[in-house]
């Protein structure tokens, strides 16, 4: 069973999160107010202010520490995929650098337990808000739509890291303790149902305040469509993926930032959804992890040589890379976020952005043999990067190679995109039926340690003790 109880033994209810918000002095947009003391869950959904505080608390918990929604995907999935390296590995990074993760790995356990803790809060919100007549209908719809989205969001990363997982949709500890893993496809069915419900409930308007009029840190309907586009792509539903991405692209709400230095700022016009930092003195986890305090310091995390060789010397996206020479050797590190720490909030955690939607639609078009349209979307990305236009594709396979290149460069060190892409793409030259691109790449990258079974992370051993119905992934 996911360790809800061990993670939240000090929480009487979701409303404690609202109290924490007030204690931590979070800004007004993430501070809906709350009671002076703890209350039990049924009391949460009896007023607009309490219900809003509970839902905001989910965002807050997802960002109050480094974890699966705040830095871990960029770091650990980046290390696992071979796009990131370390010049001096820490013990906690080494299993991901070699793709030899033990079943008692603490990072993997954190990803599992924290993700299910966030899902638990979403389940609580959905149960408390559904058919609730005490909450103003428009607010109820907004909060309920956000909860459905956030539940799907957390399940997306669970299935793409672990494969089959327990599908927990209630707050009933007794039943949850016995739930076995179910097939990935079934979890995707639930994710798509959650996103459809969120789309029906939400509007295109972002929730803002006079103090923060331009931020995009709460889910709106277009963020739902953007995430739907990604899920359709992963499911191979090419027409639906292209349609959803087109709706976002043509909405007029978002523009690619022509100044690449503005892409990851909190007022980025490219942002579809960002998560607001709440940890004192920090902006983003990626900034803290990837950017040394000293501008001349050697970075802890570096971009792999294999990635650097793929980046054209004239590519303007090189402004997202920091190069420091130490001991006569250049060290290249991610620099999409520029701030290691800062008291002011200038960079937010970029969750969904417009460039990914162009990449999604380009791939969907290529799979549909609409090659001219795929070229057009890739050229939109390439133009922003200062690269010459591609003229045409002579085959679908040629198009897919170009799409892999653009996704690899555009989305490096972001949310584990490279790791997940390699796992879902068929091999270019398959030696066995069903072989995936990840085997082709990782056998070259990690010839001494790579095994196909490493594409999935292990189910944490402690969770299998708590819930004997959990079957371990092959190879662990």
Image (tube, grey):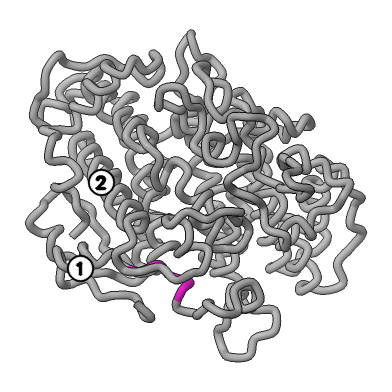
Which residue is located at x 35 percent, y 53 percent?
111
Q: Nearer the viewer, residue 15 or 364?
A: 15
Snapshot quadrant of residue 297: top right
Q: Position of residue 6 (x, y in %)?
A: 15, 47
Residue ranking furthest to the front = 327
Quadrant holding the N terminus = bottom left
Snapshot quadrant of residue 347: top right
> Which label number is shown at residue 117?
2
Quadrant holding the C terminus = bottom left
The total of numbered circles placed on residues is: 2
Q: Are marks 1 and 2 in contact (CB under 8 Å)?
A: no
| Neighbourhood count class around disc 1 (C-alpha, 10 Å): few under 14, some 14–19, many 20 upward | some
Which residue is located at x 18 percent, y 27 percent?
16
Q: Which of 117 and 253 is in front in this view?
A: 117
Going from the N terminus, do you reach mark 1 or mark 2 first?
2
Residue 247 is one of the magenta-drawn residues: no
**Which portion, as a residue range, is magenta?**
454-458
Which residue is located at x 47 percent, y 54 percent?
90
Q: Where is residue 143 in the image (x, y as percent from the top left)?
A: 33, 31
Q: Where is residue 230 in the image (x, y as percent from the top left)?
A: 55, 54
Residue ranking furthest to the bottom = 432
Say whether residue 335 is left or right of residue 318. Answer: left
Identify the residue under disc 1.
464
Q: Regarding mark 1 in the picture, which secondary structure is present there?
A: helix
Q: Nearer the viewer, residue 400 or 430?
A: 430
């Amino acid at each position: 069973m996911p360790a809800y109880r061990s993670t939240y033994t000090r929480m009487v209810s979701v409303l404690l999160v609202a109290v924490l918000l007030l204690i931590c002095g979070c800004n007004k947009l993430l501070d809906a107010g709350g009671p002076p003391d703890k209350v039990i869950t049924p009391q949460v959904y009896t007023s607009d202010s309490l219900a809003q505080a509970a839902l905001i608390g989910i965002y807050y918990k997802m960002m109050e520490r480094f974890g699966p929604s705040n830095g871990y995907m960029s770091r650990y999935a980046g290390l696992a995929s071979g796009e990131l390296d370390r010049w001096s590995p820490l013990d906690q990074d080494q299993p991901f650098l070699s793709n030899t993760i033990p079943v008692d790995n603490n990072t993997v356990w954190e990803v599992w337990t924290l993700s299910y803790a966030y899902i638990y809060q979403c389940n609580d919100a959905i149960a408390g808000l559904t058919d609730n007549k005490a909450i103003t209908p428009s607010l109820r719809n907004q909060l309920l739509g956000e909860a459905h989205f956030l539940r799907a969001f957390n399940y997306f990363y669970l299935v793409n890291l672990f494969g089959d997982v327990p599908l927990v949709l209630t707050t009933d500890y007794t039943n949850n303790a016995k739930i076995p893993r179910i097939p990935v496809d079934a979890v995707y069915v639930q994710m798509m149902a959650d996103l459809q419900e969120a789309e029906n409930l939400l509007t295109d308007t972002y929730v803002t305040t006079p103090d923060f009029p331009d931020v995009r840190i709460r889910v709106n309907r277009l963020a739902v469509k953007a995430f739907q586009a990604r899920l359709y792509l992963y499911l191979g539903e090419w027409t639906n993926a292209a349609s959803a991405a087109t709706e976002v692209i043509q909405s007029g709400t978002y523009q690619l930032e022509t100044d690449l230095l503005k892409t990851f700022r909190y007022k980025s016009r490219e942002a579809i959804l960002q998560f607001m930092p709440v940890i004192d003195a920090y902006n983003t986890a990626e900034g803290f992890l990837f950017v040394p305090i000293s501008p001349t310091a050697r970075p802890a995390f570096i971009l792999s040589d294999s990635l650097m060789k793929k980046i054209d010397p004239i590519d303007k996206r090189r402004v997202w890379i920091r190069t420091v020479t130490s001991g006569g050797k250049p060290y290249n590190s991610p620099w999409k976020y520029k701030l290691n720490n800062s008291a002011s909030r200038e960079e937010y955690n970029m969750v969904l952005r417009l460039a990914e939607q162009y990449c999604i639609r380009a791939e969907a078009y290529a799979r549909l043999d609409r090659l001219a349209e795929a070229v057009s979307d890739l050229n939109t990305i390439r133009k922003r990067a200062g690269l010459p236009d591609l003229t045409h594709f002579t085959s679908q396979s040629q198009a897919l190679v170009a799409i892999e290149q653009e996704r690899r460069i555009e989305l490096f060190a972001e949310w584990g995109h490279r790791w997940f892409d390699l796992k879902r793409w068929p091999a270019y030259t398959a030696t066995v039926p069903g072989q995936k691109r990840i085997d082709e790449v990782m056998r070259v990258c990690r010839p001494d340690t790579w095994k196909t079974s490493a594409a999935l992370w292990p189910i944490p051993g402690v969770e299998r003790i708590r819930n004997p119905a959990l079957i371990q992934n092959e190879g662990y």
